[in-house]
Amino acid sequence: MKNIAVFASGTGSNFINIYNGLKNNSINGEIKLLISNNSNCGAVLFAIKNNIEYKIINDFRFPIEKNKEYELVLNFYRIDLILLAGFMKKIPENIVRLYKNKILNIHPSLLPKYGGQGFYGMKVHEAVIDSKDKLSGATVHFVNEHYDKGAIVLQKSLNVLKSDTPESLSKRILKIEHSIYLEAVNLFCLDKIKIQY
Ligand code: GRF
């Protein structure tokens, strides 16, 4: 059984979807912990309601202490896999190093398009609509030291409609996110993801 930690700062729909997906399907993984920087976000409220352990890690004056705290907490829960699900803070380098090829992220575009610093949330969908792209979608990828640049695990596209607004597009893409993220978690838990360089 893989021990999973989810990092989330917002609504938490991906976190909730994965939590329910793991519970209702025979997937070889269990969410042990939610880490957030925002004690009022939807993800934390869901964790409280469902008795999922959670930890709020906020910016301390000394980043080294904060980074050490991530490490201690992840060690304590013997975490095998970290899932970033709308986490608005940069993952410290010590964690990226320690969990090489063990951190996944979901991004609401067809990476490498519309990835990197500054492309988050509605900004991604606005850029797709402004560029009149015909396709968009979502990507699950491994996290390395560069924003949205790690190896791609799964990607699924949809047609951008003429009538789409950034909001309507984001809603349809969120459904894709939910389905491919759970699928990627399942593959990871089955040790079926191989990275070739
Ligand atoms: C999603 O759009 C995801 O692609 C991005 O952050 C958003 C999180 O949404 N990384 P939610 O909190 O899971 O609903």
Image: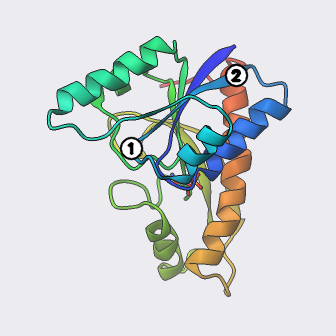
Regarding residue 192, the answer to whether it shows in the image is: no
Whole-angstrom CA distance, mark 2 to mark 1, is 24 Å
| Left or right of 183 in this view: 165 | left
Q: From this viewpoint, which residue is outermost toward the right?
A: 25
| Left or right of 130 in this view: 91 | left
Quadrant containing ligand 1 reads: bottom right
| Whole-percent x, y for residue 117 in the image | 33, 55
* Residue ID for mark 1: 37
| Left or right of 136 in this view: 147 | left
* Residue ID for mark 2: 29
Regarding residue 122, the answer to whether it shows in the image is: yes
In the image, what residue type sits under mark 2?
Answer: Gly
The image's mark for residue 140 is: none
Q: Quadrant of the N terminus?
A: top right
- Residue 110, quarter of the rendered image: bottom right
User: Residue at left 76%, top 31%?
Assistant: 22
Which dot, 2 or 1, sits closer to the camera? 1
Count of marks, rendered view:
2
| Residue 57 or residue 109, whichever sits in front | 57
User: Residue at left 69%, top 80%?
Assistant: 161
Q: Are marks 2 and 1 in contact (CB under 8 Å)?
A: no
| Whole-percent x, y for residue 61 in the image | 15, 38
User: Residue at left 63%, top 45%?
Assistant: 46
In the image, what residue type sits under mark 1?
Answer: Asn
Q: Answer above or below: position of 54 versus 136.
A: above
| Residue 75 or residue 149, whichever sits in front | 75
Q: Secondary structure at mark 2?
A: strand
| Left or right of 182 in this view: 90 | left
Q: From this viewpoint, which residue is outermost toward the left?
A: 62
| Whole-percent x, y for residue 49 in the image | 66, 41
| Whole-percent x, y for residue 131 in the image | 48, 78
